[in-house]
Amino acid sequence: MIRRRWLVLATIAVISVIAAYSARNIEIRFAFRNFFDYPANPDVATIDRYHDYFEDPAGFVAVVLESDDVFDRRTLAYVTELTRELEPNPLFSHVRSLANARAIRWVNDSVDVGQLLPHLPATRADSDRLRTIARDSRLIHRLLVSEDSRATLIAAQLAVPPSSSTLPDLRRAIDVVNRTLAAHPPPPGITFRVTGAPTLEVEASDALVYDQMVFTPIAILLIVIELWLGLRCMHGVVLPMVAISIAAIWTAGIYPWFGRPIDMVASTIPATLLVYGAVDPIFVLRRYLDKLRAGLTKEDAIIATYRELTMPCLLSSLTTAVGFAAFATLDLPIIVNFGAIMAIGVMLAFLTTMVVLPVLLAILPVPSQLAISTRLATRIDRALAALWRWLSAHRRSVLIVAIALIAAGALYTSTRQTISVYYTRILPPGSTEKDIRFLESKFVGVIRSAVFMEGPKDIMKQPRTLRAIEKISDTAIAFPIVTAAISVSDMVREMNRAFMEGDPKELRIPDSLTLSAQYLQMLDPEDRQRLLTEDDARSHIMIFSMDHGTAEWRPMRDKVMAVAKQELEPLNIAVHMTEQSPAGFDALDRLVHDVLWGFVVAFGLVLVLIAVIMRSLRIALLSAIPNLVPVVACFVLLSVFGITLRVGTVLFLSVSVGGLFNTTIQLVARLRQRIAEDPTLTPDAAIDDAIRDVGPPALFTAVILALGFAIFGLSRFPDLRVFGLLASNTLIVAFVSDMMLSTTLLRVFFRWRR
């Protein structure tokens, strides 16, 4: 490569241009469906079949209006105006509001199933009458109007489902709503907000873009500062940055081949790759400068450096890549995609270290300033020497304390950890979270589950089926997190009460099949379609709940499904719990299990790889203990602060598994080299030399990795902030553990030649 340096450099440039051109197709998009939509997930087929019959609530752009009383004439007139403006737009299949909602009530010796608002109220008594009717209707109360009558909702359903819509499609729909509001501003005393699943998705996608615009420059700046502090020459800053940047460009060029957008998990890839890509170049540049100071020529220094570091760098890169690749064996695409891309990116970073870096070193002149005996370097060297002297005198105590801490930490965390995913912790805070909490307090909230029922023709209008559905709804309502449960039995009960002159005691399912069938036939066709298929063979119960985490949601799901199967299966009715929230929650809970299991698999694979390449099972086993310490420390941290296991709080395992072993591998490799160079060295002297050679670059890489992940503390996503804190903590503790525990274990159990 040195002899053909210009040809190699031209090849690198051509590949980089092609990769950059390919990278233009990368899309950044947050979609809750990404967490569960994959071919192996049977829930997806159920959701899609369910949405073939019933509407997708994720497709509503919602306008929430607030006033002192939404049933006064002025507010209802404004609701009617907005509804009429939005209804003709082809982007929306239909628009639902108080202006076109229908209700069942007893009026003037007859039953009326017509519009709730046939005309605007003329008096306060008319407004109060509308309020009473709306409160008695399960399809209006808390769906379109709040309990206190101070907020109402206009829901515009997208004509194209969100799963088939592009991000520009969602933006256009939101823009139509915003332009309508701008063209028809609310009267004084009425305020509005635009929300809904499409709005949340667009805002979360914009937050991902914002994160990338913040993370990448800060990560680059941190790496530059650390490189300067660690190497003290322009070569030590510019050359690693060029190698890292080329690896990042090549990885970005490969990313579109996977056919997935950058989601919340994948948004961590650029910064993670940048900080991991800096590890090998730091070791290479440090050793290269050492060789130059020892008097070698430029080319001899390059060759000597790579003769010593190619194998440990290859092994550390392989262990890191294998650690990531282990996550590519799981089911969830967001983790599979992350693991595969990071594994490829790490190996590309190793490739650029092996190709780009030596070529640039060969082209550029030798740095004019080779002395790095700065105060910082001197202090680090003295500290490492003092550390080893102390460890040598307290070897047994160090091992006993380490093993005790691992055992106590594992026992403590195993009894206190809970898997509980929160929808609001996935989304960025601010207006998004406030809107969700507002919808929970005023309306039914955003967590919707559906008990989807399929049976023979006409089965859903049978009184015994309706009573079973009523029992299932009552079971759900009994849970404090449930805000509403709506089903076809509610409509039949309301119709029966209306025909019994509004008697509250008659809010029940009639015994007569003929009467139930007539009631259903009299329902407004649109309302009936929301709850029943035309052949009365399929129906559903809409269950709305607050976002208190899956730890509280799962018992409700399990109890409801147990009652549903007990009541409906004898009637030959198949029952499923479906909708995006159940599918997403189940997938996210599985994601936590998968990441935990993936870490165990990755950790084991790394140990096997170390044993094979180092040709020593002893070294592999020795490297396991110090690298468990930082992981246990993070789980203890989670337990102490009462943080549940969820996406962001376990994701640190996927990015830290490779970084854990870097220093261990470099220590072992350097120790073996020193023994081979000078067989007369005593064990203490050999380890002392290895620590002082590996310690400084290992410290700099640990700081780069820790600070690189710490920038996720600036993310707009709460879980990514927790992820950054835990990943930083893991890698700093890993460095300390290696310096103290790995060296002690090597001194005690390494196969020293006597």
Image (cartoon, rainbow, N blue to C red):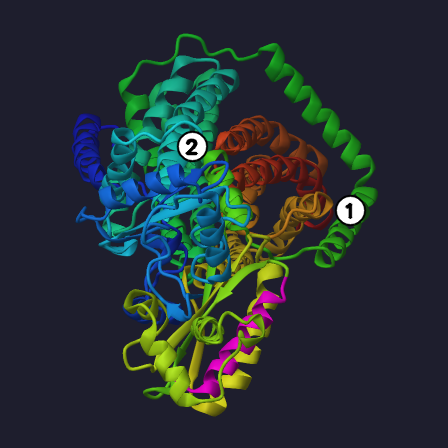
> Between 590 and 114, which is closer to the camera in this rendering?
114
Q: Quadrant of the N terminus?
A: top left
Give above or below for 548 relative to 226.
Answer: below
> Could you tell whether 442 is left or right of 249 in the image?
right
> Between 98 and 623, which is closer to the camera in this rendering?
98
Q: Amino acid at mark 2?
A: Thr
Q: For mark 1, does the 10 Å Cα neighbourhood hold few (<14), some (14 to 19), or many (20 or more) residues? A: some
Element at label 2: strand
Are the residues tagged 1 and 2 within 8 Å (C-beta)? no
Asked if residue 472 lies in the magenta stretch, the reply is: yes
For residue 693, what is the image quadrant? top right
Distance from disc 1 to disc 2, alpha carbons, whole Å, reads 65 Å
Question: What is the residue that sits farthest to the front in this orientation?
Answer: 108
Q: Which residue is mark 1?
A: 399
Q: Residue at x 52, y 19 (%)?
A: 230
Q: Residue at x 47, y 43 (%)?
A: 124
> Could you tell whether 551 is left or right of 614 in the image?
right
Measured from the top left, where is residue 575 in percent x and y? 44, 79
Give above or below for 488 relative to 208.
Answer: below
Q: Taking the image as drawn, is residue 22 in sight?
A: yes
Highlighted range, magenta: 460-479
Q: Residue at x 31, y 40 (%)?
A: 28
Q: For mark 2, does the 10 Å Cα neighbourhood hold few (<14), some (14 to 19), or many (20 or more) residues? A: few
Q: Residue at x 63, y 67 (%)?
A: 478
Measured from the top left, where is residue 567 in percent x and y? 53, 85
Q: Amino acid at mark 1?
A: Leu
Q: Which residue is mark 2?
A: 191
Q: Taking the image as drawn, is residue 446 in sight?
A: no
Question: What is the residue that sits farthest to the top in this orientation?
Answer: 368
Classified by dominant secondary structure, the portion drawn in magenta counts as helix
